[in-house]
Image (tube, rainbow, N blue to C red):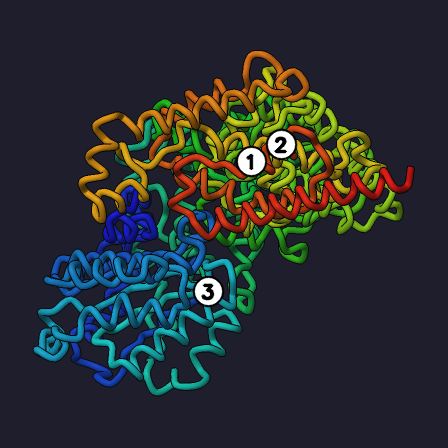
Amino acid sequence: MIRAAFERLQQATASAAFHNSSERFDPPRCHPRTRVAVLERIMNWILGKEDLNALILWLYGPAGSGKSAIAQSIAELCDAANILLATFFFSRSDHTRNRGDALIPTLAYQLASNIPGARARIEKIVDRDPLIFKRSLDAQIKSLLVDPLQDLVASGYFNDPSSSPRLIIIDGLDECQDFRVQHQIIESIAHALQQHHLPFIFLIVSRPEQHISYSFNSGRLPELRISLALDNSFHPDDDIRLFLQDSFLRIKNTHPKMHYIPADWPLSDVIESLVKKASGQFIFAATVMRYTSSTRHIPPNRLDIILGLRPAHNDTPFAELDALYMHILSSVDDVESALLIIGTVLLRWQEAILSHRGLHEIAKFLGLNPGDVEVILGDLASVIEIDTGYGYMDPQIHILHASLEDFLFDMSRSRRFYIDPRLMHTKFANQCLQDLNSTFHYAYMALLFHLSKTLPTSDLRMGILDLSFDEVLQGVVNDRHARLVSILNPLPRWITSFLTSIKMLGFEDSDHIYAHQFASYDRLIMMELDKYGWKPATQFLLSIVCIVRSTARLHFPSSSWMSAQIDKPDDSQLHLYNIAFHDPETLIAFLEDSTRSGIYVMGDDKYAVAALWCLLVLGHPNEQLPGRYTNHDLKMRRNSPWRWRQLATIGFFKKRRQVIKKTWESWVDFGATNLVPAPHPFAKFHRHWEIHKWHSRQVYSFILKFLPEMLDRSGKLDMLVKLARRRSFADTSLKYPRRTKRAKEAMERYVARVAGEGSAEEEAS
């Protein structure tokens, strides 16, 4: 079913990136009466009062300086004034908005919603090119942002900056995962502004990373942009002081343990001390207040702990934040388990639909009781949030500050709390190997991700050697979540990727480990073939795979049709069709190597059985053209109407179909004891054919396509020879004259070849 253009646009849109998205509930914004100078400076540029020639404003500052809060406040101000066109808030912790491929579709969706007439134009573009979202950033910008607005630009719709929506805000560009994509986003926007005269202005917010600074200071960017640094020129200390005063007042008035708080708490010199320690970074002040306002503790006691931290170093912007993190982590009773939980959240496989940030999922993965995680993280509420707002769903664990990851992964900053990513990935890979035997769905999804980042340890080696694909298969079958994720990464493809990963791990005996697990996969394939036996439809599937040799060229008319033909045995848990479709290379190598496949090696006898099955299907009497008559009959009706009426009156056409049916049934009965076990294998075929009649013509054409090559590879089979000599097909073959002709020529070659081989054998004897 073809989806509507706007629905495809919605599917490509990252709704969580909107400034007013419900998924960004209570986003950071500027505290009232703070950041006034910065907000005024940006608003003057937006309204065209300053820097009229600048089409990009790059707002940058260190982590924790309040950039996202400023971007959010600007978005809300401009939205209220109807001059905001679109926003995109990147977040490295959200897999829907930490990549660049959703940026332009998300902006286009908002453009379609905010500009009259733009939606219809964008829908036409998406209808014309449904794969537009897979094209380059430059192509997407031109098609989805530039072209739909040409008429409005010419009409002067965007001439007044104070009344037309023309501002696009991109926040957290540095949180886009790939730094090359970050550079490409900047370059593509600049190119669109300069070459296509895009009628927008862009507020881009990020950290001053080296590659981002280089992008903004090279090429065409310097003449298009202005920069605004969040430094001491905006007097952040005054804003932090106001924020602290208001926050302490709110604690005194609303905290559950307010009766333990003195009336004069905190003293003015304490606030000044905190302002100094903040070093102009709002994240420090916000973290202090979050730590102090914990409802589980008495606020004055928590504040006294903060005041005992080591003095700040003015030359390091994160010194006080590091000191606070060090103290918070030092107060945790079981810090080793806490770091393990944090590492699980930070190093999870973010592409997984069932990515395990849930409290109970993490507890299960780490072998903890469900309540243990909440207890262990209880003293980390200032940096970690356990979100229970999902109702019936598993409570989610959120890292509130991106700088915590930087801190923990930098040994020079975190010291004894340092998390070594490779050691942590190795531990998680070992855990995944164990959980595969207990049917845990995340292990199936994430093992390959963790293996790509591990160290070759002895425990990991033993875990890989002990892994049984049979047990993995049982896990996929028994775990309902695993069945879901196996649709995204089918087991045959997963096994092949796992075997490839083994070679990349760097073990001294990697070849031995690979050979051991490769032999295990062979045994799994052999077990499946034993369950399917020698059914003709099974030989047809295997023959097709060996002929085509690539899923890129293998397009069954219907996977359900092919699946139904090979009639999966009740005791088969890994459908043979899945191996054939998702890992054909391994299956072909197995079938063509007699040392591996044994009696199942693909020889001329197997191709002969498959070709016989094809001829039986192609001669099926139910295979008739729509309506009562063939093309030949209709031609007779047009050219010789009198003769046609005579034949129709005596029931000639009906009798002819009955003759074909009886002939076909006689051939099925012939040799049935040697080929077809009772009950007749086509009984299921009849039912399937009636249910899926709408695609039966494609099935017929598909079999006709591969029959010639199958016959060329076939050995002598008496029943196949008899059918090939007859060269009889059902009426449907008339719709495919070229393929039918090639099939009949192949049948002639086969009969001649078999006859020649028989004569040669007689002469030799």
| Residue 275 at x, y percent in the picture | 40, 57
Specify few, some or many for label 2: CA neighbours under 10 Å numbering under 14, 14-19, or 20 or more: few
Residue extending farthest right: 765
Mark 3–mark 2 Cα distance, whole angstroms, equals: 82 Å
Q: Is residue 731 left or right of residue 739?
A: left
Which of the two labelled residues, at mark 3 and mark 2, occupies the earlier sequence position? 3
Q: Secondary structure at mark 3?
A: loop
In the rendered view of the protein, which quadrant contains the C terminus? top right
| Residue 560 at x, y percent in the picture | 46, 31
Mark 3–mark 1 Cα distance, whole angstroms, equals: 82 Å
Q: Secondary structure at mark 2?
A: helix
Specify few, some or many for label 1: CA neighbours under 10 Å numbering under 14, 14-19, or 20 or more: few
Q: Which residue is mark 2?
A: 722
Which of the two labelled residues, at mark 3 and mark 1, occupies the earlier sequence position? 3
Residue drawn at 35 percent across, 79 percent down? 191
| Residue 760 at x, y percent in the picture | 83, 43
Q: Quadrant of residue 98?
A: bottom left
Q: Which residue is mark 1?
A: 726
In the rendered view of the protein, which quadrant contains the N terminus? top left
- Asked if residue 540 shows in the view, the reply is yes
* CB under 8 Å between discs 2 and 1: yes
Closest to the observer: 60 or 473?
Answer: 473
Residue drawn at 41 percent across, 41 percent down? 698
Amino acid type, callout 2: Lys
Q: Nearer the viewer, mark 3 or mark 1?
A: 1
Q: Is residue 415 left or right of residue 390?
A: right
Q: Secondary structure at mark 1?
A: helix
| Residue 296 at x, y percent in the picture | 43, 28
Residue drawn at 55 percent across, 34 percent down? 615
Amino acid type, callout 1: Arg
Q: Which residue is mark 3?
A: 62
